[in-house]
Structure formats: C-alpha cells, structure tokens
Image: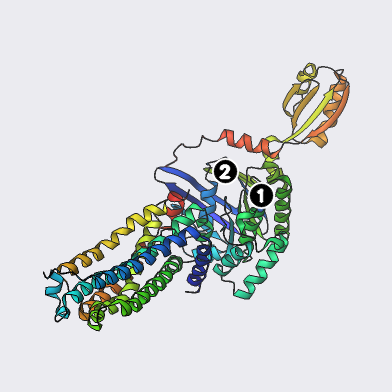
Amino acid sequence: MHAIETWDLTRAFGDRVAVERLTFTAPRGAVFGFLGPNGAGKTTTVRMLAALIAPTSGSAVVAGYRLGEEDQDIRRNVGLLTESPGLYERLSARQNLIFFARLYDLDAARAEVQTERYLRMLGLWDRRDDPVGSFSKGMRQKLAIARALLHEPAIIFLDEPTAGLDPEAARTVREFIKELRAEGRTIFLTTHNLPEADELCDTIAVFRTRLLRIGAPDTLRAELFGSSTRIRVAGDATMFLDVVRALPFVRAAAASGDALTLSLDNPDEQNPILVQALIKAGAAIRYVEPREHSLEDVYLHLVREAEPIGQSHA
Amino acid sequence: MRKALVILHKEWLELRGERTLLMTVIVPPLLLTILPIVALYLIGSTPDEDTSQPGAVIADPSFVGLSEPEVGQALMGKQFGLMFLIMPLLVPATIASYSIVGEKMRRTLEPLLAAPVRTWELLLGKCLASLIPSLIITWGAAAVFVLALRLIVLSDRVYQVILGGGWWILLLLGSPSLALIMVAATVAISGRVNDPRTAQQVSAVVVVPLLALFIAQLLGVVVLTPLLALIASTALAFLAILAFAGAILLFERENILTRWAS
C-alpha cells in the first residue's frame, strides 16, 4: 500500500481553482518532493492531505485512511511542519512539546519521554526551559520539526523546512530528514530549494495548480533532456556544428565558444563515433565529458511550459 | 474531555505571562467591589432627608418598615448588588477575546487545528480558560462585598434586603451561565475577526439585557424574588448550553484557516 494516494483531488476557492485534478501516489518510506512556484497550490495540497481543509472534489487515502471520512485518524497519523513554526512564545520548548504530545494522545509519561528524545536529538535539551520567544529562527524550526514528530507519525509533511535558515541549521535539518527516511518514514517535502530536493527526494512531483510531471529526479532529467555530452575542441566549435548535426543519432546540438553540447540517446555507444567524426573533420579534441542537467533545469523547463498562475481552470 | 483540560492548562500557562491582560482582568472587578462599598458607607453615614419613595421601594415589599436612612442604603445596595452579575460578563470577555484571534495573530492556529482535537474539545478548553477565572474573581469579589456589608449596613434588615434570596440564587446559579454565554459569544466572534478588541466590542452586546434588568429593578418594574431568580437562572442555563452549541456550529475550521489566518 502507498503512503498517499490521490484521485482527481481538486480544491477551489470560489471561482479560483487552487488544485486541479491531482492524481498521484507517494510510496512508503521515501522522500516525496512537491515542487512548484509560489501560489501554485502546494500549501493547499498539504492542508488537504493533512485533513485541515476538505477537497472540493476527488478523493485521497492518507496513511491508509480515507480523506473526509477518517479525518481524525489521518490527523493522528501524520505530522505537519507548517510554513511558519507556530510555537507559543511565552511557553518553554518543553511546555510547547508536552502540550502537543498530549493533544496527540500520548499519556503524561510518554509525552515526557518523547519530548526529551526529540529535544536531545535536535540539540535543544539544554534550552528546554527557556521561553521559545528567546530562540533563534533555526532553533524554532527545529522545535517545530520536533513537534511534528512527537507522536511518531508514519507520514510527515514538511512545508519549506529549511526556508530562511543559515547554512549550518539547514544542513542539520537535511541530515535529520535523511535519518527519518532511514527509519522508514514517508516524508512529503515542499521546497523551493532545488539542490536540496535533488539531494533528498526519491520522487519529485512538479506542480502548478495541476501536476506537471512526476518521477525520480534522474528519470525526469532523462525524459526531458536525454543524455548530454560536452566536447571541447581547440578553436571555434561552431565550425564543427554541421559535422555533428549530420550524424543521425544526435538529437540536438549547440556550440558556444570552444564547446559543443550534444543531446544523445546512448552516449556509451555514440560518443566514440562522434569523436571519430570530429577528428576526421579536423577537430583537435581537448575534453569529452558528460553534461548533467540540474533539477533546476527540469523544474524551469516544466514550469515555464505550464499556464500562468491565476488562470481559472473551472 | 482530557484534551479540553490540556488546552485549558496551556491557556493558563500563557495567561500567566500576559501581565497587561491580567491587569485588565483584575482591575475592573476590584473597582466594581470597592466603589459600592465606599458609596454604601457614605450613604449610611450621611442619610438623605428626601422622603419621596422611588418606584423600586414602592414595588418591593422587603422595604416595608425600613427607616428613611435604611431605605437609602438598601435601595443603592440592591443596585450595586447587580454589579456582581455584570462581573461574570466583563472578566471572561477580556480573556476569551484573545482565545482564537490570539492564536491567529501568533500563527499557532494551524498546528493546533492539525492535531486530532475535535472542535468541541478545543472550544471547551478555551471557554473554561476564561470561565473559571471569571467565576473565581466574581465570587471572590462578592465575598468581599458581603463581608464589607456586614460592617457598614445600618441594620440587619438592610443587609437582608440587599442580599436577598434572589441575589444569592443569581450569583451562585445564574453567574456561571451568564459567564458561559459571554465566553461562547466571544469565542465564536473571536474565530471570525482578526483583532481581539473587535471580538470584545461585538460580544459586549450580551451585557445589554442585564443593564435592562438593572434599570427595571431601579424603576420598580421588576422585583428580584427568589422564584424569579430561580426561573431566570434556569433560563440562563438553557441559553448557555445553546450559546456553547452555537459557538461550535459557527466555528468553521476551514474558513478560519483559509480566509482569516494571516
């Protein structure tokens, strides 16, 4: 069974459709990246899946429970890190966590144990009795993550977990996410940080009101751009553009300065043929290297192809 | 029920740190207790020579047989006594107005609503957090008033007229219901506005019927007998239950999150 399954999940606010016919599955024990520009409907999706708001139409099963029918069970089995940490600033870190642990049905003794466990794990134990109002942004974010985990949920929704954090705090959070994945938890991660998504996510969904593409980061790269090879030659590479374009297996070719960038289906077999053709044409080859497309390339390619935000899909 | 108590505990922990809010909760009842005591003492020590009988004295048989100075003190004492029925409306409104809107302002509402807490548990916790201090303050202030009366009234008859059976019944049975009506109204409004002062001002409408009782008693239109107080307390209990149920019905989690949350 999947951690999350949705079928045509749709949410409209009046005439404006925030999420349109979203259908996907998120496997258990994996990090599922949910990427999209501001206003794409990511937070609305998370709120629907966390049973905070109801869909206008469509259905979903989250942690094995049906959305709209077993909402209390969904809330009990998911953890949510909201965009803003949302902590009680006059209360201490410990009081904040104990409060939420009790709301998530942990008895008093277990609430104490879990609070200590996560405060220690996230390096906040020494500050446990300090009011949260005195905490740095990074400490608050860590505490909010601890709050989302206290009841040991099977699925954790993390909305921009490293936004606004300094590099060290962001790294701590990323390492922590990896630990959670290693424990077999499912993590639904929304982020604008594409290198972070590339590093952490097993599956990525690119979303802009509707689902644009879903797959493993490497699969998306291959699907959109194929494999690329960059060949650097002595002198002007544009002189050899016609030579490589004449080869039937070259899907696309571009030249810039001394570099030729070529899109190929099977570089292992086709690179030697390519090199032979260039040498035959008089090229002095300096380097042959694979060219990796970043997740940012994938994301921008998909998002720019999609319709502008604000257009009604009703 | 357990989760309502968890929320109640959290609310009190937070309230403890809100010194300004605590002052606005404590100072008005303090004034409403001290001023009547001082006023009644002065009335008792400087008797009015006016022998005309106001409507309240003519209509209320308990005044029969009192001397002119005793009538003056008893008449004012009865009016001041009603202040203690207004008190359960003043105190909880201040606290309750922060209940939901305060969570919105601090952006703590979303994690709270994401927890497996039912609306009635959330609102019961919020309501109790305002209701219990309000009753403690009201009954504490009333106790001070009762003890002070013992010392300043001109006679036992005056004491009995001011603190008649109707007053005791309304204080002990009616005030919890009054407070709950106010709290439920304020919490319901607090979920729909973005400013605690707005919630407080709108919910102040609940005070109007009590002011009507205040004036009606002064004019002699209403005499607060034990039977009337008992009927009123029963009606108020019924209204309080309706008000709480109404607050639950009016609390729309989705709208609060998507429309009002900043």
Residue to which mark 2 is pinned:
A207
Q: Position of residue A305 (x, y in %)?
A: 57, 33
Residue A69 is tagged as none
Q: Residue at x 53, y 61 (%)?
A: B17
Q: Which residue is mark 1?
A: A203
Q: Quadrant of residue B227?
A: bottom left
- Taking depth in this image into account, of A192 and B247 the one nearest to the observer is B247
Report the quarter where the N terminus of chain A lies: bottom right
Which chain is indicated by disc 1? Answer: A
Label 2 sits on a secondary structure element that is strand
Q: Are marks 2 and 1 on the same chain?
A: yes
Q: What is the three-letter code of the residue carrying label 1? A: Thr
- In the image, taking residue A223 as reference, residue B37 lies left or right, namely left
Pinpoint the chain carrying mark 2: A
Q: Is residue A59 left or right of residue B165?
A: right
Q: Amino acid at mark 2?
A: Phe
The answer, for residue B61, to whether it is visible in the render is yes
Residue at point 25% right, 66% down?
A: B210
Disc 2: CA contacts within 10 A as few (<14), some (14-19) or many (>=20)? many
Residue in the foreground of this view, choosing between B210 and A262: B210
Residue A249 visible in the current orientation = no
Label 2 to label 1: alpha-carbon separation: 13 Å
Residue at the image position 49 percent from the left and 72 percent from the top: B5
Q: x, y (%) of residue B14?
A: 52, 63
Q: Is residue A176 above or below residue B127?
A: above
Q: Is residue A19 above or below residue A266?
A: below
In the rendered image, the quadrant that contains the C terminus of chain A is: top left
Residue A277, image x, y percentages:
84, 23
Find residue B167 and report its image quarter: bottom left
Label 1, residues with CA under 10 Å away: few <14, some 14-19, many ≥20: many
